[in-house]
Amino acid sequence: MYKALMNKKLNIYILREIIPTFFTSLFVFTFVLLIDKILRMTELVINKGVPFGTVIKIFLYFAPSLLVITIPISLLIAILFAFARLSADSEVVAMKSCGVSLYNMFPPVISFALTMYITTTLLMIFVMPHSIRMLNVKIYDVIKNRVDIGIKERVFNDDFKDIVIYVSEIDKDTGEFNGVLISDSRDSTQPNTIIAKKGVMIANKESREVRVLLRNGTIQKKVGDDEFHVADFDEYTHTLSLGKGNDPAKISKSENEMTLTELQKRIKIIDDAGMSSNNERVEFHRRFALPFACIIFGIIAPPLGISSRRSGKSKGFTIGISVILIYYVLLTFGESLGKRGVMPPALSMWMPNIILGISGAYIFVKSASESPIMLFEVIRWFFESIEEFFKKITKKSY
């Protein structure tokens, strides 16, 4: 009874160290990733008259795709900081002297990691596909309704990627363009320039495209190093695509917009057609592999935090950031290998979890038995060498 009560108090004590830091880190990391979007959304509100409420909806639709990344990162940082603080204040030493091992401190950590794993999995499987779909629809609606406002007279407008539009005059009543120049470099091998007397914007909601209907003009297309193909037209439609278009060989939704059921159906359709479904299979396994990082980080973070006792909190934090970078570099590398067919999609997406999982388990067991960890010794030597180097430089400068 007494032991159970002490374990309960220990669990609550450790969770109190982890949870506040977790939510603080979650806010900070999510905000950092949102900075670029905040600047763009501010431009929409100020320069193009997009309602503030619409911008808030765009942020809400975009949030789940960020949270599935920032939740595992914040989990690692929170656990690492918690154990670094306990270690720095010699509380870990005091606990061990009372017979409390690292294994006894692990239950609250893994419980919190499991909670975040379930949360991230639910976001990945059920919330994120719908939110990305709604995000794309909302962005399309904004551009569809405001693109004519964004186009200004006698200004080179570059709102569309790799496309520059210049309009001499805009009819305020009809919205029709007079004197249109479009420079399209989406295909870098064959850039083209279109000059027309008249033009008007037309939106296509089904294919998520904005088209420019042009009249009485000329198309100049570069077909070689010094060759140009010139063609006159009475009427021509130039497409400014916002999505995958309406190619009948493609499904209107992108892979990250699909539910698991839709992904499985698409994989079957593509496989039956004798084509490669690597992209869809990679996305399918990513939905399960990425949330599992919470478990991996939950295993590897406690020994990383405890190791900061001698090397300092800042160095322990640096090790934690290094683990995050290693994980996401491996994830990106594996995703690339899986999509190219170099590695089976399932293995490519689970590779970071396998590598860091085995490494984390090894480090945890070594730390629990208080055995020296060669990796930590090498890292500690590396940081101490850099510190000594900068101390020498600082002394010489004075």
Image (cartoon, rainbow, N blue to C red):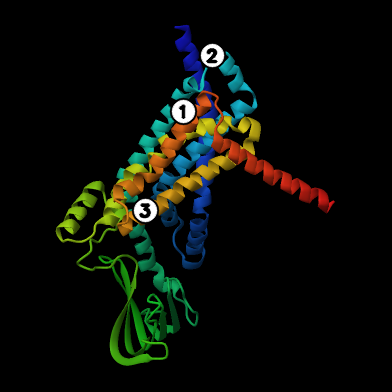
Which residue is drawn at the image coordinates 46% and 51% (left, top)?
Answer: 329
Alpha-carbon distance for marks 3 and 2? 44 Å
- Would residue 21 be seen by someone viewing this image from the given angle? no
Task: Residue 234: give x, y in percent of width and height.
Answer: 28, 91
Instruction: Determine which residue is flagged by label 3.
Output: 335
- Label 2 sits on a secondary structure element that is loop
- Would residue 178 be seen by someone viewing this image from the given angle? yes
Task: Residue 397: give x, y in percent of width and height.
Answer: 82, 53
Instruction: Determine which residue is flagged by label 1.
Output: 109
Specify whether 280 is left or right of 116.
Answer: left
Q: Nearer the viewer, residue 182 or 371?
A: 371
- Label 3 sits on a secondary structure element that is helix
Specify whether 395 is left or right of 250.
Answer: right
Instruction: Determine which residue is flagged by label 2.
Output: 99
Say how many tags the image has: 3
Specify whether 188 is left or right of 20.
Answer: left
Do callouts 3 and 1 mark residues in contact (Cβ within 8 Å)? no
Report the amino acid beneath label 2.
Answer: Gly
Alpha-carbon distance for marks 3 and 1? 29 Å
Q: Is residue 107 above or below residue 75?
A: above
- Label 1 sits on a secondary structure element that is helix
If you read the primary sequence from the N terminus, does the residue marked by circle 3 or circle 1 appear first? 1
If you read the primary sequence from the N terminus, does the residue marked by circle 1 or circle 2 appear first? 2
Alpha-carbon distance for marks 1 and 2? 19 Å
Q: Nearer the viewer, mark 1 or mark 2?
A: 2
Toward the top, the furthest residue is 1
Report the amino acid beneath label 3.
Answer: Glu
Which residue is drawn at the image coordinates 38% and 61% (left, top)?
Answer: 139
